[in-house]
Image: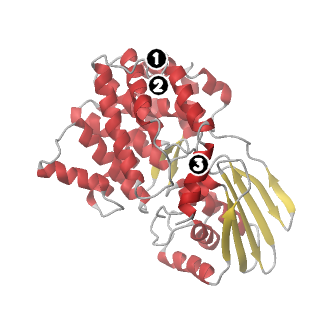
Amino acid sequence: MKKDKLLSILERELVVALGCTEPVAIALAAATAKSHVKGQIEKIHVNASGNIIKNAKSVGIPGMSAKGLDFAAALGAAAGNPEKKLEILEGLTKEDEQLALQLIKAGKVTSGQADTPKKLFIEVIIQTDQQTAKVVISDNHSNIILIEVDESTVFLGGCENIGIQTDDEELDELTIDEIYDWLLSVNLDDLELVRKSIELNKRIGLEGLSGEYGLNVGRTIKENVKKGYLSDDLATAAMSLAAAGSDARMAGSTLPVMANTGSGNQGIAVTLPVVAVAEKLKVSEEKKIRAVALSHLVTIHIKSKFGRLSALCGVTAAGMGASAAIVYLLDGGLPQIKAAIQNTIGNVSGMICDGAKAGCAMKVSTCSNVAVQSALLALSNQEIQSTDGFIHDNVEKSIECFCKLGNEGTHQTDQLILQLMLEK
């Protein structure tokens, strides 16, 4: 594969995002709808797929105390700038929050589950005293496929089924072998976006370690290292920094992150375990950047088959990318990288997604720990054998099995999880 194709993949799949991408997408749809109508808002209605509801129900929104689908829609309609795309919440204030809450208190905002087989689907209808607008986002958090004003179509576009923004042809060519070969030869100057992902995501990781966010998973790990209850090793370093980033993001930090394939939490889980291990090992800046690039690309490769939203936790795929990168940091080669991915697949494949929330930081911590463990096992020439579970003797086949499990084997689980959440 040519270098420019892999760089193009990185440019499409690494996107700066502020706030959890599900409520952000709702806010984007609402802000877009409001921008197409005049007058005072009388009604806002959100229809969303089950996976969107699951991930927008309880997660924190940057700089705000309120949560939920209704609030995200009201906030976008009241104060959002649709031109900012996934950074739509940047710069919003407590005054903006009060405007959104006033709409909710007045009974002007409602929401429900859309009747759609799509995992990522958002429809926002805004009615004012003069006009009505409808906006639909589908398959990708910023993929607006329809804008209607007074039942007349003013925009019909987007791309159906673009779980990943990169062309299928490019992704079909992508393999672990090709990613590794490219990584060894790519010019470091071409990895500026990867460098930026390290800077942005480390900043929110450090914020999580220094502040009070969510369950304080990362901070608690660090404090217990100081107490001597946990050892100061590669695993705890990876767990604490990565979990702290998720702590801050899930609890509404106003810091942006570099998302990977549409997920900010996944972007954190792809980068920060690798950054923590790199700094613990005191490797060169170049090696750290190349390792994070490897982690990003392996995860993109897996997520291109897995999809953006599933009943399985997407951070598991990030753990697979991180495990490959940690092998690289420890001077392992391609066989050990493949073995680390195999080990991670065999460990965390069954982790379910029960929505975006503060507790996601615990899953980030778990997958970061597994990434280190899987890498160390691989470096000792220990690999889960093809006689075990659904693991194959070929890493690409194991990836396909993992993704098939996420895509085809969890529909009933996904519906049950949402039902259990909504019954509370």
Q: Sequence-wise, which precedes: disc 3 or disc 2?
A: 2
The residue pinned by badge 1 equals: 181
- Please state, as top left, top right, bottom left or bottom right, where the N terminus lies in the image: top right
* Residue 238 horizontal side relative to residue 190, left or right: left
Q: CA distance from mark 1 to mark 3?
A: 37 Å
**Do the CB atoms of the residues marked 2 and 1 lie less than 8 Å apart?**
no
**Front-most of residues 33 and 371:** 371
Where disc 1 sits, the SS reads helix
Q: CA distance from mark 2 to mark 1?
A: 29 Å
Residue 58 against residue 350 in the figure, above or below:
below
| Kind of residue sitting beneath label 1 | Asp
Where disc 3 sits, the SS reads helix
Q: Sequence-wise, which precedes: disc 1 or disc 3?
A: 1
Which residue corresponds to the image point at 46% horizontal and 70% vertical from the top-left? Answer: 64
Residue 63 x %, y %: 44, 68
| Kind of residue sitting beneath label 2 | Gly
| Kind of residue sitting beneath label 3 | Asp
How many numbered marks appear? 3
Where disc 2 sits, the SS reads loop
- Is any part of residue 417 visible from this angle? yes
* Residue 122 horizontal side relative to residue 51, left or right: right
The residue pinned by badge 3 equals: 414
Q: Residue 346, labelled with which disc?
A: none
Q: Residue 389, labelled with which disc?
A: 2
